[in-house]
Structure formats: structure tokens, C-alpha cells
Image (cartoon, rainbow, N blue to C red):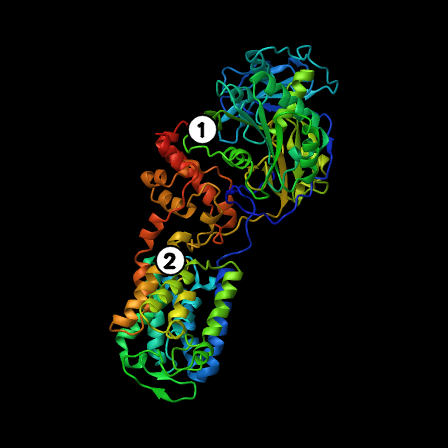
Amino acid sequence: MKRLNGITLPFRKITDMKPIQPIGTPRYVRLPMLMHKGTPCVPAVSEGEHVAVGQVIGRAEDAQAAPIHASVSGTVTALTEFTAEDGSAVPCVEIRADRDQVLSPDCKPPKAETKAEFIAAVQASGGVGLSGAGVPTAQKLAAADSFDILIVNGAECDPALSADCRLMTETPQDVLDGISWIMKMLKIREVRIGIMKDKIAAIKTMSDLCSTQKGITVCPLPAVYPQGAEKVVVFHTCGRIIPEDQTAADLHILVLNVSTCAFIGQYMQTGIPLIERTVTVTGSAVRKPGNYRVPVGTPVMNVLDAAGCELETVNMLLNGGMMMGSCITDLNAPVLRQQNGLVAMKKYRPPKKSPCIRCGRCMQVCPMGLMPLKLEEAYEKQDLQALRKLHVSLCMNCGCCSYICPAHRPLAATNLLAKAILPENAEGEQK
Amino acid sequence: MKKFVVHSAPHTNVKTNTLSIMGCVILALLPTAIAGCVMYQLPAVFLLMATTGTAFLTDLVVRALFRRDRTAPDGSAAVTGLILGLSLPPSFPVLWAIAGSAFAIIIVKELFDGIGKNFANPALTARMLLMVLCMEQMHTWTFPDGTVDAVSGATPLVQQATLWDLFLGNTAGCIGETCAAAILLGGIYLYLSGIISPAAPLAYLGSFALLTWLGGYPVLPQLLSGSLLFCAVFAATDYTTTPITKTGKVLFGIGCGCITYFARHYGGYAEGAGFAILIMNLFVPLLDRIAAPGAFGAAAKRAGK
């Protein structure tokens, strides 16, 4: 089978041997009402109210949202505003922790006998895609009437991240529980777990565990970035090509992140909603890089402290990995529930761009077979017709083109801008 | 409050830049330049220094006048100048060479918006201009031993030279074009360092060899003489003026091979490689369009509708 293009990143992961460690309860948490892809939640608590761990504090008004739960017990100190990644202002609930961590009486194992009940339970859990995108999981489960195959995405191809890798090595049973629930409830017979070839330990534990399970296979993915994108992981695990204007759900393929599966497994057993997650903390300013178990909404400052980061040396902070992460500008910013990485870099200077020399490297590395240099030209001319012809909508913003460009042109960022000027994508942000 | 860098993803990049690429190209041109300087001695040294220096300075001055960012330090102008110098006969007048070098940078490169935007190969365009303007000087060939071969209108497609002479460059010709061994060395280095794709040179040489064989001419002497090899390795692989896709590169090479063959055997100018590249330069936008890579899932989309 032909593999899609990509890049081989020269650095080795330094955190994939570091066991997951809890950082403890922070003094306060900030919980923005938009910690998923979709519409913001509506605050369900008021100032001064006492909340328990796992209590709903943000109600989902429609299927485009997943409810938000308190990650600590304590008092709501303020309802403020938070600037989300896309620049929109969303309400934000601040809770001062009382450190008692009293569990809300609502947190009990859900009963699910049918598919509808199961999806409702997942919706109530606040489960979202945990690898960065944050699509509400219930929305994914309901995206097609039936699914033929479940692809568990354990690619985690970003060189900085290792949270999923650790999860598969340390608690593979949770992943399997989640998979079993989904298989049973959605009547899926075939499951493929995609893990990058270089994660030898994770492949071994998952294969050992799944060898006795019928229908579950572990598929090693090429050790090339990117692997985690839906279209790429579907192609590399089952060889199917998702047409340009369709998604995996249209082909009756369900793609879920491995941490999301593990979360579903745990939730069905304990009933504790999504209030904690594993974040890989790394970067040149971090002295103790590793994987940390963090209550959602913890200020990044506290997480960096726990990882031995000298805050005054930090020059760039990233939510996510090196390749697709977005910059954080505030040390008080909360850790979001879809956030898989926190990178703190010393002295980072963005490279200086120079004119394109038409070397074609961007095109050679593009997994989607696009021509980023032509897209850039078309964008500069604001030529919508050309942008469509060049299939700009296929760009998944993996960043291979920007990475490889010897002229250091921000090609991936240009593609984002190009997608935004197409009228058909005008409301695409809500998708 | 502490300020952080805000930057669009990805937050890491390769160390390769335009300067390092151009550095590799200059390194690859060095064996050829050294061979030329050893064979043709001082005149060749002066000529190469004149064209390279002129190109560098012109680029610096013109871009400053046009108020554009400086690009001369990235070495691209020097490469243009060096290639031009290498494609001139050693006895060529230095002043004309300087004029040609300035023409390459100002007219062919900068008037089209500079590096990456010009559609024709600057060094070859300047060479062709000089060929038309200075017919006589351009066709005065000096042998390494100092004797002059003034066969008018002909190129050093020297019939009496042995294959071994052609391979080592022990014959009359342009400074950088006679020593096939040095050119191949440079080409192999560029290929191994990942700077060039071998598609265009191989398609060029392959198609030319095939036509020559079909036409009943001796293949190896034809391949090794004239500027064919030099153009195939250093001009048919220029990033800016050749197609970016592999299929495009192959088609480009085949086009060059055909034009060179017909120019050599049927044309008025016995040397066709430079013209072949320039003519094929005009086809690059077309080749880029027809040889575009298939976008993932785009075909499935059309079929589904």
C-alpha cells in the first residue's frame, strides 16, 4: 500500500518513557464555556455558589456542545470572560478550590442498554476528542446511522507529545473497555488501533491485550508526520480514501482518539465526567518534562511549576504540540479539556521569511497532494476560483509545508486564511 | 505582564534555507570551475570572477534601487553569474561578459520580480544574447594548449577528440562545459545532497541519446560534447525555471532532448542545449498545470457526483 507523504522529524521524544504523574489540586480553576469544537455552553452556576467535583457548571444547549463539569470542589468566585482560540469571547467560570474534592452525588455509573442511552450517557460525560480538536464525542457517535469499523487513533505523531503513548502503555485496559462498550452499543465488529511504528512499547501492550479479543487489530502506522489526521489514519489503517467533500462518517467509519476511548471506558465504570486529562509538558524551558495528570481548568502556570519550569525564561508557550499547537499569551490561561500538550520554549525566534524559490519541497511533503506554493500565489491574488481548483479545502493544516520550506514561508497559515476567504466556508468555523 | 511570542504553527522548521541551497550549488559548480581554470588558466579565472562579481553586485544595487529586500547575500545571484561565466569561451572579452551578467540580473531576473519569479533561466538568456551579439568571440575556441580553433559557426562538437578527451575536458570549448567528469561529479553531489531531482537531467539526456541513436549518430561523443551535459545538470534543474512536479520535470527533459537533437542536426546554430532549455522554460506553466499531483480524494469526489 502506498503511504501518504509527510516529513521525518529529526527529534526524538523525550517524554515517552515518563510515567503519568498527578499534579494535585490547584488553588483555583478557570473553566471557559468553550472547551470543544462547536457552540459554547451556558453557565449553570452563579457567583458564590458551592460546587462539587463533577457537578455540571456549563449546560450544553445543543448537540454541537458537550457539558462542562467542575474539576474541583469549592466556591464559584466569578463569572468572567475568556478569549477562546478563535478570538471569540466566551463566558468563563472561576472556582476557588476548597481542597476537599467532594464528589457530586450525580456521579454514578450510567446505565446504558441501548445505543440511544449510550450516546446520551457519553453526551452527559462531557466527552470530547482529547487529541486537540475537541469534537464532542456523542456528536461523532451519532454522525452516521451505523458504523462498519472503528478506528482508534493512537498516532500521536507530534514530536512533542506522548500523553496517548503513556496511556496505552500504562492503562491499556481502559482503552479496551471503551472499545468494548462502543463495539457492543454501536454494533461494530471491526476495530483497528493505529499506533505509530516507533512507539514500540505502546504497540506491544496493546497487541498483547487485544490478541485475545475478536475483531480488534493493532495497525502500526508509518513513522512519518502526520499520521493523526482523520483522512491519513483511515487511509493507513484500512486503505480507504475519504473523498474530498466527505468525512469518515460518510463512509461509515468511526474515528476516535485512543484517550477518548479510554475516557469512555472509565466513565462507564465510574461515572466521573471529563474533569481531568493527561498533558505532556515539555520544551526547552522545562526542567522536568513529562506527562502530568491535570484537572481541567488548572492555570498553565501551576502545571509549568510542577514540571520545574523557570517561568521567567519562557519566551513562547504552546497549547498542543510543536507542529499544530497554538500560542498561549497568558500564564493564567487554563488547561483546556482537549489540550494534549503544553510546550514552553526558551528563546524562540520565528524564522525570517524570504522569497519563494519554487523548489517544490512543500508539494513533495504534502500528505494531501496539494501545491502549497501555488495556493499561496492564489491567495495573494485572492483568486477564489484557483483556490478551489487547487483543493485548498483538503488542507488539514499539518504544517509539513511550512516546516520544510527553505524560504520559511508560513504556507500552512496561509492555507488557513485562504480557506477562510472562500464563501462556502463562511460558517465553516462552526462545523 | 510578561510578553510571549505569538507565531503561527508549526513552531519548528528545517535548518535548510536559500543560502545553504545556493551554497551547495556553488560547491557543485566548483569542480567544473576548477577544471576550467586549470585548463584555460588566467583568462578563465578573470572571466569567472568578473561574471560572478558583477552578478552579485548588480543584484545588491538593483534591489536596493527597487527598494526590495536584499537577496544577494543568499548566493542566488552569484550562482547565476558563475553559470554564465562557465558557459562562455575562455577567450571571451571580459567587458562583454560583465554586460551579459548585468543583463541576466537586471532584465531577466529583477524586472520579473527577482528570485523565484523569473520565467527564463537568467544565465542562459544572457549567454544567448551574447551569442547573438558577439558571434565571432562566442565561437572562438581555445584549446587547453593555447592554440585557437576558429571554425566559424561550429561548436566544439569536435570530431577528432577521443571519448576520453571529451570526458576529461581535454578539448576546446567553454570554460565549464568541456570536462564531463567534473560536471557529473557536481551533478551527483547535488543529487545526493537532495538539492536536485534527477528526473529532468535523466529525461533530457535519455531522450537525446535515444534520438541520436535512432538518427544513426554516435551517441557517446554527442552526449559528452557541447554544452549539453552542463545544461542538463545545472540549467534543467534550476528551481525557478523548471516544473515542480516529477512528471513535469520528465516532460521538460524530454522536450529539451528533442529540441537539442533537432537544433544540433538540422538547425543553423550547431549548439542547441541553451536554446532548448530557454524554449522549454516557456512551457513550464503549462507543464505545472497538466502534471499537478492528484489531490487526495479529489478523484473520488468527482466519481461520486
The residue beneath circle 1 is: A429
The structure residue drawn at horizontal position 43% and vertical position 72%, both measured from the top left corner, is: B53
Instruction: Name the quarter where the N terminus of chain B is drawn.
Output: top right
A226 left or right of B78?
Answer: right
Chain containing mark 2: B
**On screen, residue B204 above or below A416:** below
Chain containing mark 1: A
Tell which of A252 and A319 is nearer to you: A252
The residue beneath circle 2 is: B242
Q: Nearer the viewer, mark 2 or mark 1?
A: 2
Q: Position of residue B242 (x, y in %)?
A: 38, 58
In the rendered structure, are the residues bearing label 2 and label 1 in contact, judged by CB atoms less than 8 Å apart?
no
A32 left or right of B101?
Answer: right
Q: On the image, which quarter does residue A284 sit in?
A: top right
The structure residue drawn at horizontal position 52% and vertical position 20%, both measured from the top left corner, is: A139
Instruction: Name the quarter where the C terminus of chain B is drawn.
Output: top left
The structure residue drawn at horizontal position 42% and vertical position 81%, both measured from the top left corner, is: B162
How crowded pointer 1 is (Cα within 10 Å; few <14, some 14-19, many 20+) is rated as few
Q: Position of residue B32 (x, y in %)?
A: 47, 74
- Do discs 2 and 1 share a chain? no
For the question of whether residue B105 can be seen, the reply is: no
- Amino acid at dot 2: Thr
Q: Position of residue A68 (x, y in %)?
A: 59, 19
Rounded to the nearest whole Å, what is the CA distance between mark 2 and mark 1? 38 Å
A56 left or right of A384?
Answer: right
